[in-house]
Amino acid sequence: TALVTSFNEGSDQLSYSSVPNALVLFNPVIDNGPGGYGYERIGEAYKDFSPLHNIREGAPPTIFFLGTQDKLIPVETARYYKTVMEKVGSRCDLSLFEGEGHGFFNYGNIENYKKTVSEANRFLISLGYLTEEPVIEID
């Protein structure tokens, strides 16, 4: 992930950073620790790669989309992630979609799809990666 530094391939060109400049996250798994997703399979190895447990100073600015009824990622976990990001001085915008479940933004749900794409665009504009709202119409 963008937050993990201990997993590099032997052939990686380490003089170039593979850390992204920004993250746009759609209902991401962020907690692999005890009680989190997949912990029963990985045990204590979660410390090496669980995003929540590897947040550090310089973490990329992030926008995080989540439905309040997501059965896989609790809203409380997302809020805690935002808090930890901000504690280390990194921006984390949390966009909660009331009453929505996992995958609420998929193309089949056109209104939420448009809202998340538009909000992601505004986030990237605020960081200087886009210069204006795209003119592409989403039908």
Image (cartoon, rainbow, N blue to C red):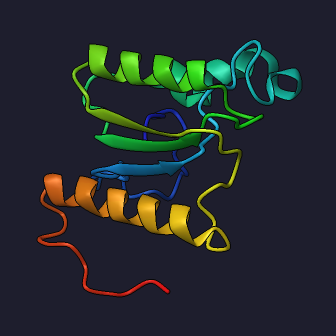
As drawn, is 20 to the left or to the right of 35? left
Q: Residue at x 25, y 79 (%)?
A: 134
- Residue 39 % position (x, y): 80, 22
Q: Residue at x 81, y 18 (%)?
A: 43
Look at the picture and state if 82 lies above or below 136: above
Foreground: 62 or 71?
Answer: 71
Q: Residue at x 37, y 53 (%)?
A: 18
Look at the picture and state if 50 lies above or below 43: below
- Residue 65 % position (x, y): 50, 45
- Quadrant location of residue 33? top right
Work out whether residue 1 can be spotted. no
As drawn, is 2 to the left or to the right of 14? right
Find the residue positioned furthest to the right.
Answer: 40
Look at the picture and state if 50 lies above or below 114: above
As drawn, is 116 to the left or to the right of 43? left
- Residue 6 % position (x, y): 51, 33
- Residue 9 % position (x, y): 55, 51
Foreground: 91 or 67?
Answer: 67
The number of discs equals: 0
Work out whether residue 117 can be spotted. yes
Q: Residue at x 25, y 28 (%)?
A: 90
